[in-house]
Every structure is written in structure tokens, then in C-alpha cells.
Image (cartoon, helix red, strand yellow):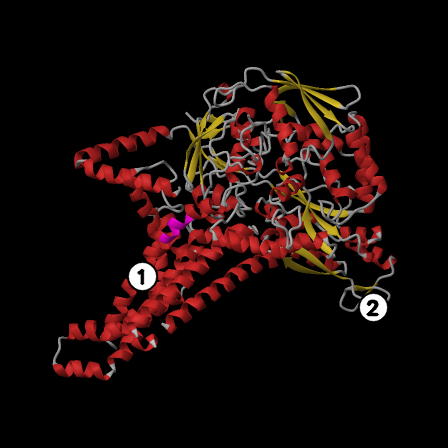
């Protein structure tokens, strides 16, 4: 709420006070209360984030609560890539086709789609959007132009051609995930990277309703191209500055859809009304124990294997994550993609084995000391610092569990909590020994393996331990060079062998994607029995989910 | 006038020092502001998006630190705070305008209430020294002052908000519906009650104890004995003789605390999800938002310095010795 609104509001107060008789005021009060009950009948309340008051910023290319509602609810992408199933769902586009040499991708756009101001959506908007994020790389949040997109051209009103400079058969996921904006509005903005889109015009299912810094609403777009699917007429999004306040609101039935970190959820939230409350914590980004592979001591794969054998993932999840995370398999392929798991290597999947770990350390020339800690030939103890971001309570608990488990195999691990900025800086500068960290999974395991193991991402990217191997790189490059699913599977099978044999880092578990819901007002939520989409709110998933919801009679 | 000149000189030096520290401190934090997005979003952000953010914030180009400093000085002194990093691309001034009124309203009103209430209680306690009233007020003051105020806030929220449901749990006005007119005012008061109560209680103890102790020492002065000997009414002695003199130190702290109001009340704002400047500052710091931090620190420094300056100025009239 800005100064202007406050002034305006004060004026109305003054006016009402002067003009209204007591009777009138009471009548007004009654009328307003009746209306407010009606207007909130089929309203869904959701928590977008808990980072405080809102500012009016609906630019879909930036991160933050209001920006997230712009993505998917207001602005849309060409296709929706379902992160749980990997399915590519037609959205603003209906079809796509590769040229024979895989250097051109032609996309067919949906007909009869209109912008919320009544203008027609067509190929010009798509071409404009891609040209704009090329001119302003600050908006290219998927990095499509850096990955080898060369040119985007209009074929006719319903067809757009994407031309690549080199074969990259996975780039379509990045191209399809760009939010398309209306040319007739964005063309006149000057620098779109400083545009806050206070009155956003999109193709999406919702329009911005009322806005204050404490709450705003999104109203159903009456001219939406698949309006028959939208049964939630209003979305109410209140602001919270902290998790505690948001949790209280959720328990008070003020919220239908939450995305809160909520330890002890069973006892506090569910128990009060198990019939109408639910949660689902699907596998999010994997969390791993990274070795600094630049450190001489970690260069031996048998040493890394010994450490891996000292870790009991089940205990890590049970104690460290209060049993609210899913254990990962040692090749980190999520449930939805299990056909990519190489079954022939399952005998190599490892489990905790203290005796074998100790034996391996003995074979490596380390000898156990009186205090139960191994020392090397020169008498140096096997003692390592494990860094973890300060304040990440669950991860800190995980680190402590790891430390006590590794003590059992004779390795001393000291946990240090480090300020987040310093934590990433130390990893980037190779100034660490062990680090508990994560890798961004992406829409399928191919992206994950690339981020985790490609030498291009060493230290500064998600390859935090610095795994640098030509064989790995060339196997990873197969993913983007071919469109043959068999070849990709072959490559990822070989990569699994490397992961199991050489242990670049130790997979522990998947961070939970926090998602809570109630069925007081709406049903049809995704959950373990019906996992049709990932319940994240940062992108298109939420638009897909909301079209699966039905109001309760 | 030498006194005044000195004070103005001091004001300028202090302001420049504060500005310089406000510039240096945030930059001593390790890390990269673009990467802090990862922290806020819990690692859900693609690495490519961080790269894009770095370009948006202009962090991909190196600017010499001295050049940054002088641009910063010029911009700050002309109240041009630039674009926030963490709410990119919203302007810092818009963020401040939307939260400062709430803070000034909440913290300002609570400070005034607390000062008036605490001082008058302290005055009466000091006057009726060693009576049950005095022991009650003094003990209560000591106990309240011992509470960590965020704890008080949590207890109030839990009991009155959650268990009894008598007050709302969060926000500055209703988020269930869009109100206007008197209903909006009512909603603001209703939502502000618990946070204000916390702030009043939290500082009440200090006001009570300061005033009571000053009263006690003033009461032992000779002029009080003279007043009593003259046979003046008790009420007159208490208010016009003792309290007037005892009030001076409390007024000084009150003046200073007015300067601190714009700093907000961080923990209260977090507990009650109140949209104030304290929370905005916290967010600026945790997300390494240089422009936002600098602007808020500047406003806080400026108001504390101004409050000090005005106090000095008022003293010049109150205390003839300073006029030189």
C-alpha cells in the first residue's frame, strides 16, 4: 500500500464520516459483510512464499513470490514439461517437429489464444520474446541463447522455427520453458529487465485482481483458452514474514495450499483432522556428500568407497531429516524415471558395511590409532572438516549423524556451519574438504547427470567436488547429440558404472519438496496415490495442478 | 553560537562516517548477491537463472570500488537509492515507502504510550517510595524488563491469537477480504493491538525504573524540603517540583528512542508478520541486497543523528550553560 492509496483512503474515510448517518453506516456494514462472504465462496488461499510484504512486481523472468504467481498463472510457456513424469504437455503450442539434421525445431502454435487485453496471440509474440531475451541476457534465465540457439524465425502466424548452431536434442526443454510475453506491450518498455509489470497482460488462466502489500488476489480470466478446465475462480495470496505465522494460518484453516517447511507435520498439522488434511513430500533436489577432489587424500577411489561404506542413509534420513525425506539410490535416478536404471549394475549398489570399510582403509596403508581414528604413514590423523550452510537446521543434523557414523569406521569429521555466501565461495575456491550440498535435478536425469558430473560445472556449478573426467564428459555429451532414446540410455548406463565404481560424491537423500493441502474447500490434489505433477509453485506446475482441482459442494 | 557551530560540524562528520561505514560493512560479507537467491529459494533455482541475475545486477562487470563509493555518496545524498537486488526490479524507494508508514505507526505510537504510561507510573512509585504500590510497580518493571521481548511476543501470539482466537495471527490488516473506510481502520487497529502491546510492555520497565530512580533522588534535594516547608500541596510538589526535574533524563532517552523508531522492531515484525522496515532490513541483509541495506541504514543513521542534533538544540534552550 503506497502513500497515494493511504491518502485516497483517508479522504474516503473523511467523506463517509461526514455524510453517513448512523443508520446508513450500519446498513453499509451489513451489506459489505454479506458481500464479502459471497465473494469468497470459491476462493483458494495459497502461500506463495514467506518472505514478507509484497511489492507489485509481476515480471515473469525474476524470482520471488509475486513473480512466481506471474509464471504459469498469468504468463505461460509453449509446452508444460511435467517434472514428475517427464511428459511434454502441449500448452501455447500444440506440436513440435525436428528437422532431419536436428538443427531446426519447428513449433506449431495454438490457434484462438488471446492476450488478456483482447489482442491475438501469434508467432510474432514468440519471436519477439526470444529476440528480447537475446538482447537482454538478464532475462534469459534458462540460458537458451548461451546453449546454442542461433535464430528464431516466424514461418507463418501459427509456426515458429528455432535454428540451432549445433545439435542439441535436449535444448527443447529450455526453449519450451520460456514465458511468452505480448509484443504489443513489451516492445515499448525500453529495458524490459527493469519492468515490474504492475498490470500484467498474459495468456494465462488468471488476471491480477486486487493488490495490497499484505494480500492480493488472482481472478479467473473469462477469455482463457481452456477456461472450461478452470474451476477455481479466485486465488487469494496473503503475505507472511516467517514460517511460524504461516504454519499457524495453515492450521487455522486459513490456507488451502501450503509449501512450508514443516517438521513434525504429522503430529502438529495432520493429527488435528486427518480426514481433510494431507501432505506429500516428493523427491526434490538430491543432497550429496561432496569430496574436494582437488585434495590429494580424496584422489583414491578406494578411499572414497570406504567412506561411502561408512554411511547409513536410512539413519541419516531418520534422525537428520526427521524421516521426512526419501532415501536416494546410489545412482540418483528418481522414481518417475526408473526405466533408466541399469539393472545389471544392481549388484554394485552399496550399503553400510563398517568392517569392509575398515579393511579397505587398512589396505590403503592407514593404521588405526588408540583413539579408534586412522592415521597415515606420517602419523597424521584422518580428520576432515565438513562444511554446511549455517542455520539449515535439518542439514546440520544430517552432518552430525554423518560425523558420528564415520567415527565408527575410524574417520574424524568436524562439522562447521558456514554462512551461506562464504559456503559457496569456499566451494568455488576449492577451499574445503567435505561439503554437504545439493545438485539441481532439472526436468529429467539427463540434466541432473550433466550438472553433477560435467567438468564444465566443476566447483562453480553444481559439480561441487570438481569431478573432471574426459570419459564422463564424452558420455554426458551423448545426451544432447542424439535423439535416440536407446543411445541416451546406453550412455546413462555407463555413467552409472562410473558413479558406482569411482564414487565422485556420495548420494544421501532427496530434499523434500514441501507441500501441504486441505480438502475443506477443494479436492483433486496431487499426492502419493495420485502423483500427477510436482507440487512446486515456482513454475508451470501450479497452473497444471489448479486445473485438476474441484470445489467441494 | 560556538556550541551550535560545533554541533552542526559534528553532525556532518558523523553523517559522513555513518555513510562510509554503511558502504563498507555490507561489502565485507562473503559471497555473491546473485547467489543469495539460491538461499532464499532453497536451492530451487536453476544455475542459469543465477547467471542471468548476475547480469541483471551488473555484477558481471567490474567497477572500481572507489568509483562505486562516490556514485553511492552522490546517489544517497540525493535520495536516489536505485533498484533493490532482492526484489529486482522494484525500486528501493517504493519498498521503503510501503513499509515505513507501518513502522512509524506501530513503533511510534507504542513508544509514546509506553513513555507516558511508564513515566507516570514511575513518578507515582518514586513519590510513594516503599509503599506496596511502589514495590509492586518496581518489581513488575524489573520482571518485564527481564523478558526477552520476542518471547513476550510469541507468548501473546500463542495465547491470545492461537489458543483464544481473540486476535489475528499475522499481517497489518485483514487478508481475508479487501476492506475500505472505517472497517479498514478497525482492521488495522485490531491487527496492530498485539504487536503494539508487546512493544509497550517491552519498554515499559525501563521507563518506570528510570523515572522512579530520578524521582527518588530529586526528592532528597533541598528545594523539595523548602516546598514542603512552605506547605504546598503534595500534588503540586510531586508534579511541578519533583517530576519536572526528574523528567529531564527520561526526555533525553525518549528523544533518542524517537530516532530509533525508523529502525523498526525486527523481532516483533517477524513474529506478527508485520510489514515494517525492520523486516525489510533483515531481508536486505540476508539477501545481500546492497542498495536496500544502504538506504535503510542511511535512513536510520540520519534519523538517529537528527534526533541527537535536535536534542542538543533543545538543551541549548533548557540549559543556559551550553550557550557559551
> In this orientation, which residue lies closer to the viewer: A497 or B64?
B64
> In this orientation, which residue lies closer to the viewer: A170 or A287?
A170
* Displayed quadrant of residue B300: bottom left
Q: Is residue B30 visible?
A: no
> In the displayed structure, does residue A277 sit left or right of residue B219?
right
**Numbered tag placed on residue A9 in the rendering:** none
Helix, strand or loop under label 1? helix
Q: Nearer the viewer, mark 2 or mark 1?
A: 1
Decide: is B297 above or below A200.
Answer: below
Residue pictured at 36% horizontal, 40% vertical: A5
Decide: is A122 above or below B40.
Answer: above
> In this orientation, which residue lies closer to the viewer: B101 or A539?
B101
Helix, strand or loop under label 2? loop
* Displayed quadrant of residue B140: bottom left
| Residue on which disc 2 sits | A379
Q: Main secondary structure of the magenta part?
A: helix
Residue that protrudes farthest toward the front in the picture: B1
Point out the stretch of residues depicted in magenta.
Answer: B99-104
Could you tell me residue A8's position as x and y percent? 32, 39
Q: Chain of mark 2?
A: A
> In the displayed structure, does residue A251 sit left or right of residue A174?
left
| Residue on which disc 1 sits | B114
Amino acid at each position: 500500500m503506497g502513500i497515494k492509496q493511504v491518502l485516497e483512503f483517508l479522504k474516503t474515510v473523511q467523506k463517509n464520516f461526514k455524510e453517513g448517518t448512523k443508520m446508513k453506516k450500519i446498513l453499509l456494514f451489513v451489506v459489505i459483510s454479506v458481500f464479502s462472504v459471497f465473494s469468497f465462496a470459491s476462493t483458494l488461499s495459497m502461500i506463495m512464499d514467506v518472505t514478507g510484504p509484497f511489492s507489485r512486481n509481476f515480471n515473469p523472468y525474476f524470482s520471488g513470490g509475486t513473480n512466481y504467481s506471474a509464471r504459469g498463472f498469468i504468463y505461460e510457456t509453449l509446452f508444460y514439461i511435467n517434472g514428475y513424469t517427464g511428459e511434454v504437455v502441449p500448452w501455447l503450442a500444440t506440436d513440435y517437429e525436428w528437422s532431419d539434421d536436428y538443427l531446426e525445431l519447428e513449433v506449431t502454435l495454438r490457434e484462438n489464444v488471446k492476450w488478456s487485453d483482447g489482442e491475438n496471440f501469434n508467432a510474432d509474440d514468440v519471436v519477439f520474446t526470444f529476440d528480447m531475451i537475446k538482447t537482454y541476457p538478464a532475462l534469459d534465465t534458462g540460458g537458451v541463447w548461451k546453449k546454442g540457439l542461433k535464430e528464431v524465425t516466424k514461418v507463418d502466424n501459427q509456426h515458429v522455427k528455432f535454428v540451432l548452431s549445433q545439435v542439441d536434442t535436449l535444448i527443447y526443454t529450455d526453449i519450451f520453458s520460456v514465458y511468452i510475453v505480448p509484443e504489443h506491450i513489451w516492445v515499448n518498455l525500453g529495458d524490459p529487465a527493469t519492468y515490474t509489470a504492475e498490470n500484467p497482460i498474459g495468456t494465462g488462466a488468471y488476471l491480477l485482481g486486487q493488490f495490497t502489500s499484505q494480500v492480493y488476489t488472482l481472478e479467473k480470466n473469462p477469455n482463457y483458452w481452456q477456461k472450461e478446465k478452470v474451476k477455481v475462480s479466485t486465488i487469494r495470496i496473503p503475505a507472511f514474514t516467517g514460517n511460524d505465522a504461516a504454519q499457524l494460518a495453515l492450521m487455522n484453516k486459513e490456507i488451502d495450499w501450503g509449501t512450508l517447511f514443516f517438521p513434525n507435520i504429522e503430529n502438529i498439522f495432520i493429527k488435528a483432522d486427518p480426514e481433510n488434511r494431507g501432505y506429500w513430500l516428493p523427491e526434490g533436489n538430491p543432497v550429496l556428500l561432496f569430496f574436494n577432489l582437488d585434495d590429494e587424500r580424496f584422489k583414491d577411489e578406494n578411499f572414497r568407497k570406504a567412506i561411502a561404506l561408512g554411511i547409513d542413509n536410512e539413519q541419516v534420513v531418520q534422525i537428520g531429516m526427521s524421516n521426512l525425506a526419501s532415501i536416494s539410490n546410489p545412482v540418483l535416478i528418481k522414481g518417475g524415471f526408473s526405466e533408466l536404471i541399469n539393472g545389471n549394475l544392481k549388484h554394485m549398489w552399496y550399503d553400510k558395511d563398517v568392517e569392509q570399510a575398515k579393511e579397505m582403509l587398512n589396505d590403503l596403508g592407514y593404521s588405526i590409532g588408540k583413539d579408534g581414528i586412522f592415521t597415515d604413514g606420517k602419523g597424521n590423523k584422518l580428520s576432515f572438516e565438513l562444511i554446511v550452510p549455517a542455520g539449515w537446521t535439518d542439514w546440520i543434523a544430517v552432518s552430525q549423524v554423518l560425523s558420528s557414523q564415520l567415527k565408527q569406521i575410524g574417520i574424524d569429521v568436524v562439522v562447521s556451519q558456514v554462512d551461506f555466501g562464504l559456503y559457496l565461495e569456499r566451494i568455488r575456491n576449492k577451499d574445503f574438504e567435505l561439503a554437504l550440498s545439493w545438485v539441481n535435478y532439472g526436468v529429467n536425469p539427463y540434466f541432473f547427470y550433466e550438472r553433477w558430473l560435467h567438468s564444465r560445472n566443476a566447483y562453480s556449478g553444481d559439480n561441487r567436488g570438481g569431478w573432471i573426467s574426459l570419459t564422463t564428459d564424452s558420455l554426458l555429451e551423448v545426451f544432447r547429440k542424439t535423439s535416440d532414446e536407446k543411445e541416451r540410455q546406453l550412455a546413462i548406463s555407463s555413467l552409472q558404472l562410473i558413479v558406482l565404481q569411482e564414487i565422485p560424491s556420495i548420494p544421501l537423500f532427496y530434499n523434500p519438496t514441501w507441500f501441504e493441502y486441505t480438502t475443506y474447500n477443494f479436492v483433486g490434489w496431487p499426492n502419493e496415490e495420485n502423483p500427477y505433477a510436482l507440487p512446486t509453485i515456482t513454475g508451470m506446475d501450479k497452473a497444471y495442478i489448479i486445473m485438476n482441482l474441484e470445489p467441494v459442494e | 553560537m560556538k556550541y551550535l557551530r560545533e554541533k552542526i560540524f559534528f553532525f556532518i562528520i558523523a553523517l559522513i562516517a555513518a555513510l562510509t561505514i554503511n558502504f563498507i560493512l555490507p561489502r565485507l560479507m562473503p559471497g555473491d548477491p546473485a547467489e543469495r537467491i539460491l538461499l532464499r529459494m532453497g536451492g530451487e533455482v536453476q544455475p542459469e537463472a543465477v547467471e542471468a541475475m548476475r547480469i541483471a545486477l551488473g555484477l558481471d562487470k567490474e567497477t572500481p570500488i572507489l568509483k562505486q563509493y562516490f556514485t553511492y555518496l552522490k546517489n544517497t545524498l540525493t535520495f536516489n537509492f536505485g533498484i533493490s537486488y532482492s526484489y529486482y526490479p522494484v525500486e528501493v524507494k517504493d519498498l521503503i515507502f510501503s513499509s515505513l508508514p507501518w513502522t512509524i505507526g506501530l513503533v511510534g505510537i507504542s513508544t509514546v504510550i509506553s513513555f507516558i504510561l511508564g513515566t507516570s507510573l514511575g513518578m507515582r512509585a518514586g513519590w510513594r517510595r516503599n509503599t506496596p504500590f511502589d514495590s509492586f510497580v518496581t518489581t513488575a518493571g524489573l520482571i518485564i524488563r527481564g523478558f526477552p521481548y520476542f518471547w513476550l511476543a510469541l507468548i501473546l501470539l500463542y495465547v491470545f491469537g492461537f489458543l483464544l482466537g481473540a486476535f489475528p495471527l499475522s499481517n497489518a490488516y485483514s487478508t481475508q477480504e479487501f476492506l475500505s473506510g472505517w472497517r479498514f481502520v478497525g482492521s488495522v487497529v485490531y491487527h496492530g493491538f498485539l504487536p503494539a502491546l508487546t512493544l509497550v510492555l517491552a519498554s515499559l520497565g525501563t521507563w518506570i525504573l528510570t523515572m522512579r530512580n530520578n524521582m527518588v533522588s530529586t526528592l532528597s534535594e533541598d528545594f523539595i524540603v523548602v516546598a514542603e516547608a512552605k506547605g504546598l500541596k503534595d500534588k503540586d510538589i510531586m508534579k511541578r517540583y519533583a517530576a519536572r526535574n526528574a523528567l529531564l533524563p527520561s526526555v533525553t532517552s525518549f528523544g533518542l528512542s524517537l530516532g530509533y523508531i525508523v529502525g523498526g522492531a525486527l523481532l516483533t515484525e517477524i513474529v506478527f508478520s508485520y510489514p515494517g522496515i525492520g523486516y525489510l532490513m533483515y531481508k536486505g541483509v540476508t539477501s545481500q541486497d546492497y542498495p536496500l541495506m544502504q538506504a535503510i541504514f542511511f535512513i536510520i543513521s540520519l534519523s538517529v543523528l537528527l534526533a541527537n542534533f535536535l536534542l542538543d538544540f533543545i538543551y541549548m534552550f533548557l540549559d543556559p550553560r551550553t550557550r557559551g
